[in-house]
Amino acid sequence: MSDVSQSPRAVAIRGALAAHGSMSEGELATVLAADGIDLGPHPTDTLNDILDLDPELILPLLDKRWAWLPGLLDGRILTHRLTAVEREYDLLVLDPDLSPLTILTESPNYQHLSDGSPLANVSGQLDAEALAACGVPEDAVGGEGALLFEPGRFAGLGVRIGDLVGLRVTADGFDLVAVDAIAPSEVGLSIPALLDQVSDGVELLDLAIWTACAGAGTLFSEPAAPLGELLVAGGLAVDGGWVAREGFDFDSWRVRHRIEAIGEHYDLDDDEALAVLATLRLCERTAELVDAVTAAQESGEALDLAELLAQPPDPADRAPETDDESDADRATMRATLEFLAEPVVVAAVLDEINDSGQLTGAVLGLFAESVEPAAPRAARPALRWLRANAYEQLGNIADAERTYHEAESLDPTWPLTLLSLARYASDRGDAERWVGVAAPGRGTTG
């Protein structure tokens, strides 16, 4: 628990929200003042500053009210149908059924069951060693993680595959119970009403459920059908923790928001941001092809990486393309690469690749080398510059500098190449070259 969460004001905020339920900032400031908590001459501003520091499990809801989740969810129960893997390894995969409760495991009070037995929120990737020590295969946990209980827990409950189990929130931790009967639930009606108030019609599932609970004190007070089933019955769909009406195009929505985020972060227009995203996808495709060739070689199959890289991207499971479609794909790729001639665009690409932590220098270099022959002439200095950066990431400084010089020969005025070479010159103490390159008028912005 953080120092902020233990501060007297944070403790008072939790107490007020526990006693009075969810409140707006203004309402909360009034309650705190009545309880003798001094928030200074500007109480709402002070309160907002405190809340922004994220005191433990105090979060804003969709209706602009604030809630303390242990108090909001106390007594509520969510259910889940037990699978064979879950029954065998005494775990519950974190699918939408239990997702709104799992944030509570960030608190020590919810890292055990109410009888004191241990409970762990585990990830297949992050907790592989711990899972192996418990005899749990990594793939049993699933991509979203799982709640892991002590061995024999489900046997002790007398539940079998397909039976319902419930996870109830109590002041002493979670109760894990067998569920024999279920009650009707209004959540299938509550969530669509909330989505109607959201501009793009999609929202985080957990946040939507918490807001619905704040608006209906009895929601999930009794065991109901699993949340995933209730949402489907209500004409809703869940994808990656987001909920929307059935038929919502999550893929297009993610692309649109990714473009907006890139544009805002790097001050790019929509076309430039789209080019950044499209270039990142081409890099990801290169990584996938490298993985495919490596796997094929390990199994004794011969695949030609150069031949695969020369092919334009082809969406999975698409029917064999016609010559016209292939030409269109190449034209799209060429149009994307044209934007790399802009220093701000290619710099954003490199920044995103470095931030991803998943695309290696080897992949970056292979991508830049493979697409350069098909790129417009104006973009080739940028691709050669990316190759030089890839060499730097691999620790090959000599080849990096040589490749920067190659990029300079393609366009002696391209600013990012000049800045990179100036950096090398500066490291050698060649101040005159550094001043010459960095002087105003050289196009070094971006």
Image: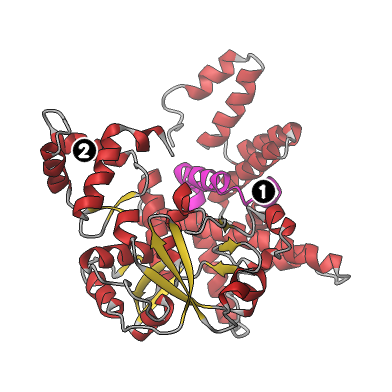
Magenta segment includes 44: no
Point out the stretch of residues depicted in magenta. 339-365
Q: In this view, does 361 lie above or below 284?
A: above
Residue 47 versus residue 112 in the image, above or below: above
**Mark 2 / mark 1, whichever is N-terminal:** 2
In this view, the mark in front (2 or 1): 2
- Residue 216 picture quarter: bottom left
Residue 359 lies in the magenta stretch:
yes
Q: Residue furthest right?
A: 300
Residue at 15% over, 38% down: 35
Identify the element where label 2 is drawn. helix
> Dividing the picture into quarters, in which one does residue 391 lie?
top right
How far is the residue under mark 2 from the one under mark 1? 44 Å
Near-viewer residue (400 or 20):
20
- Reading the image, the residue beneath label 1 is 360
Q: Where is residue 207 in the image (x, y as percent from the top left)?
A: 33, 61
Question: Which residue is pictured at 44% across the width and 39% down the height?
Answer: 1
Secondary structure at numbered mark 1 = loop
Residue under label 2: 47
Q: Which amino acid does label 2 sit on?
A: Leu
Q: Residue 107 in the image: x percent, y percent?
A: 45, 48
How many numbered marks are there? 2
Residue located 48% across and 47% down the image: 108
Mark 1 residue type: Thr
Q: Which of 150 and 238 is in front in this view?
A: 150
Q: Main secondary structure of the magenta part?
A: helix
Work out whether residue 188 can be spotted: yes
Is residue 406 visible in the rendered image? The answer is no
Between 256 and 73, the one nearer to me in the picture: 73
**Horizontal side of residue 97 vs 366, given as left or right:** left
